[in-house]
Image (cartoon, helix red, strand yellow):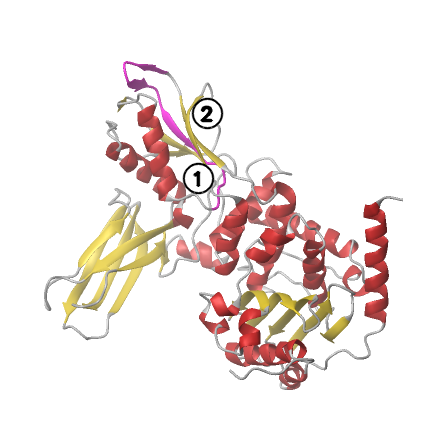
Amino acid sequence: MSMAVLRGLAACTLFGVGLLHSAAAASLQQLRGLAAQGAVISARVVDLSDGRNLAALNPGQALIPASVSKLYTAAAALEHWGADYRFTTRILYTGEIRKGELHGDLILQGAGDPGLTNAQLWTLAQRVRAAGITKLNGAVLVDQSLFGRVRCDTEDRCNALANSRDAYNAPLSAAGFDYSNVCLRVAPGTRAGEPARLSFEPFELPMFGLRGNVRTLSAGTKTQVDVTRITADGRNWFYARGGIAADAPARCYYRSVSKPALYAGEALIAFLAHAGIEVPHSTARVVSKPQSDTHVLAEVKGTPLSQQLRGMLVYSNNYMADTLALDLARTANPAPVSMKEAGRWLTRFARRIDAQSLWEGARKGQPKLDSGSGLTVGSRVSADDLVALLAKVYHNYGDFPAFLGALTVPGQTPVDMLKNGSKIWATRVAVKTGSLNSPVSVFALAGYMRLPNGHWGAFAVLVNGTRHQPQVGLWTALTATRGDLLSILTSTADVDKP
């Protein structure tokens, strides 16, 4: 009998015994109190080393998961590609090169890299110049055929095609970059009363326009700037108003763009010009079908998947998560692919995880994922589903380090709501958060913990509002969740005061 089989039998024995003997499980007193006030809650905490159930409250109840959906996207990407995988974005060309001039089209081939940045576009431009190109005599095309044209999948994204005051609702494209966001940089003038200095980063592009007025205020005054992006006349207009204190630092106001592939193409043209290449056109043309008779001119590899997943999970980047979900769907479907197909792909993945689970509760689950990000409110998962996923990754020793490293630890997190609490809370959990406020409030927290006995534990808590009580306060849900998890973490240890 192989060692792998022996390990599998040992794990089954541990989990089978542990979960059948759960009489000593913690009560989750604070979460039960929240449920008594009208919230719907699904929670499970397990010891991953021996399978003991440490706490449970309606663990099989499927609820809206919000951004903890991204745990499935991350786990699936690691399983499919591995932690060191890098997406490769290429520059292609048609025609021929004569004496440094390209007599044909230059093509940016979108690779579905969720973390493609302007720094990588700059690298591509430099590599085009290093290949000997000094002048383009054709068009600059952006090939988004890997996904095809991706239609908006949520109310937020559909509305953002017309206007946006946020960064999270960016539309998707296989050729998008910088998360389909642009920075409007606002810096104070030299003295109070002067107009503030407004500029786009990395470049002023033909697709952008600027309207409005931001004034420089007296030093020490509170800065109040409002930026709205509106799509009109084929351009993205940025309306800025308000004031910035004379002694305030410059700040970027990130807003989603309505045409991500065109944005990438125009930015590439600007980088090519900065690299010393003569470009006859200031704007690009987007195509959704592969071009024929092409040759590779330059390429750049993205950052390793493990690093991208940390950015996606810690900052809950919806653009990255849904781009990865489309990448995964593309492995099973020809272009064009949709978020519905990506959701079906992730749902099959989640149900396979449940079917392979070591306890009956998860095997009865029917998780449903409509997206990779959790922006879609039709998704439903239970605490049992999530803990089954966490246990699966924990026992996959090749993926677990990268998966764990992509989670955030409260003592070192940029997520403000996680920072308060005891030293034990700050150092002994690694988590992913999720929240929504419509049509009902959603708070979710899932991840790993180091138990007092030194074992690894996994936990998932989902708190949803209901039709009769649509809103459960975010801080109320977090406080109850943290309090109950701390009671487990300190069950045999001294409690640290906040």
Q: Is residue 353 magenta?
A: no
Quarter of the rendering occupied by the N terminus: top right
Report the front residue among 224 and 366. Answer: 224
Q: Which residues are magenta?
A: 96-114
Residue 397 location (% of width, % of height): 68, 50
Identified at 50% across, 60% down, the residue is 314
Residue 20 in the figure: left or right of residue 395:
right
* Residue type indicated by callout 1: Ala
- Where is mark 2, residue-wise? 291
Name the residue at 70% across, 51% down. Answer: 396
Disc with the residue nearer the chain's start (2 vs 1): 1
State which quadrant residue 103 falls in.
Answer: top left
> 194 and 17: which one is in front?
17
Image: 365 above or below 416 = above
Q: Nearer the viewer, residue 473 or 163?
A: 473
Q: Is residue 454 left or right of residue 178?
A: right
Describe residue 216's horizontal placement relative to residue 94 as left or right: left
Which residue is labeled 1 in the image? 175
Q: Secondary structure at mark 1?
A: loop
Whole-percent x, y for residue 226 in the image: 28, 65
Q: Is residue 399 left or right of residue 195?
A: right
Circle 2: residue type:
Gln
Q: Is residue 58 visible?
A: yes
